[in-house]
Image (cartoon, rainbow, N blue to C red):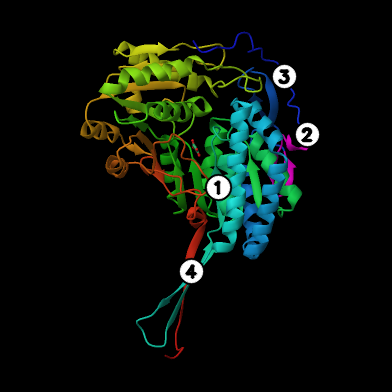
Amino acid sequence: MPQMPQGIVKGGKEDVKLNNQALFQTKAYINGAWVDADNKSTLKVYNKATNAVVAEVPDMGKDETARAIEAASEAFKSWSKTTAKHRHDLLLKLYQAHQENAEDLAKIIVAENGKTLAEAKGEIAYSNSFLEWFAEEATRTYGHTVPSPLPGVRNIVQTQPVGVAGLITPWNFPAAMITRKAGPALAAGCTVVIKAPAETPLSALAFCHLAEKVGFPKGAINVVTCAKGDNEAAVGKEMCENPAIKKISFTGSTRVGKILMSQSSSTLKKLSMELGGNAPFIVFEDADLDKAVEGAIACKFRGSGQTCICANRIYVQEAVKDEFCKRLAAKVDKFVVGNGMDQGTTHGPLVSEVGVNKVDEHVRESVKAGAKVLVGGKRGEGLFYEPTVLTDVPAGGPTDREETFGPLAAVYTFKTEDEVLRKANDVNVGLAGYFFSSDVARCFRVGEALQVGMVGVNTGLISQNVVPFGGVNESGFGREGGKTGIDEYLVQKLMVFGGVGN
Ligand code: SIN
């Protein structure tokens, strides 16, 4: 059995000790100032492993958000006029500042999100890579010229920043989802208002501290913090409906994405929606099984299963199903679940009670329908859940309907390629998909047939700064990272010159 923590959920208060304590900011950041909520109310930030309070941050609403948008609009007037080289240099300084503080930034993630220190360091490396990449991309927002069919006419297409960008970020990657949005926005010449997630606002505030230190002008970057519920809804609505915001980029659930999209329709904003997935992970009988197991572990249990691209439905071909399950279960058995700061911990807690309940419901419902528990299957204390492997999961269960977003590996059996492709594509979302096979023709065939935005072929790890991240169908639209990531924050301006002569 995986090792589970005992007696660490103690509550109380806890200090987060850093080398550079100034990174630990607990006020919101609007127009270059560290500010409280107008009514001074706060929300508590918990260590997800110990349930201790690590900070209290402002619980803001509509009015503070409107002021942040006003500040960003004012700053846009000058920031959008800076040279691409200037923005490159400043973003590179921000990247360097993040690199120098990497260890502390990782500790902040562990304190507020619960992932292990090793995973948090991995996230910081990933997060910082977007700052470096988009610093470079700032200087490559090329336009083009187009030969005209009309005599004496010259066509020039330029790119311009879209305007103030509203960025709504999730708790599962408290740092990386900020840099993946703010990096390209700032590089393009946009200013930003960030709504930090209620569960993990501290990484967003550390980002502002470093941005201030390296010299970003006041108003260019603003962070609003708020509790879940009414204030969160009010902040999101203001961002979507305020006409001064020209772009919304959201990472989160499909349900909330639809609400934001409908609210944004009143002002017809440019949108990027990185929404939920339900990733199929297919193991064909010609696969290298050890590599497939390694891929399943990496992709299913990353962040304790709390990523949008985690495998959710693991389909294994009949002939290799028992062997695959045996090897997978043996690896999961060795997990050490606990406080992310403790040496030796391989997997941390979940982020919320709601998340734990959902995993438990998925396990119970699947077992009731006939799935067998190979490993785990029970709640631990607090926000911990045993890493779980279920086999013989029947079709039509909860993991077919929605992503678990937790440490449950649900293994299904299939007979043929056609059958598994039909099942894999039988969902309304399409973010990531994975498969393992040593047949080159099949690799192309299956890769092209999967209805998803991203495919891992013989790998469970696909996330990188240099490639486009995003989905199809109800997983949303728009791409982050890669060479097109900056386009989400740019608009094309056509200038047609007449009377130029031939
Ligand atoms: C996400 O879960 O939203 C992002 C995952 C990643 O970038 O790898």
Read off the residue under disc 1. Answer: 181
Q: Earlier in the sequence, mark 4 or mark 3?
A: 3
- State yes or no: residue 27 in magenta: yes
Marks 3 & 2, CB-CB < 8 Å contact: no
Q: In this picture, is 171 found above or below 30? A: above
Q: 55 or 422: which is nearer to us?
A: 422
Q: Nearer the viewer, mark 3 or mark 2?
A: 2
Read off the residue under disc 3. Answer: 13
Q: CA distance from mark 3 to mark 2?
A: 17 Å
Q: Based on the displayed image, in which of its 4 quarters is residue 255 positioned?
A: top left
Residue 270 lies, in percent from the top left, at 46, 54
In-image side of 22 versus 57 (left or right): right
Q: 445 or 276: which is nearer to us?
A: 445
Q: Earlier in the sequence, mark 2 or mark 1?
A: 2
Q: CA distance from mark 2 to mark 1?
A: 26 Å
Read off the residue under disc 4. Answer: 493
Q: Is residue 200 visible?
A: no
Q: Amino acid at mark 1?
A: Lys
Q: Give the magenta range.
A: 21-35
Q: CA distance from mark 1 to mark 4?
A: 22 Å
The numbered dot on residue 21 is: 2
Q: Amino acid at mark 2?
A: Gln
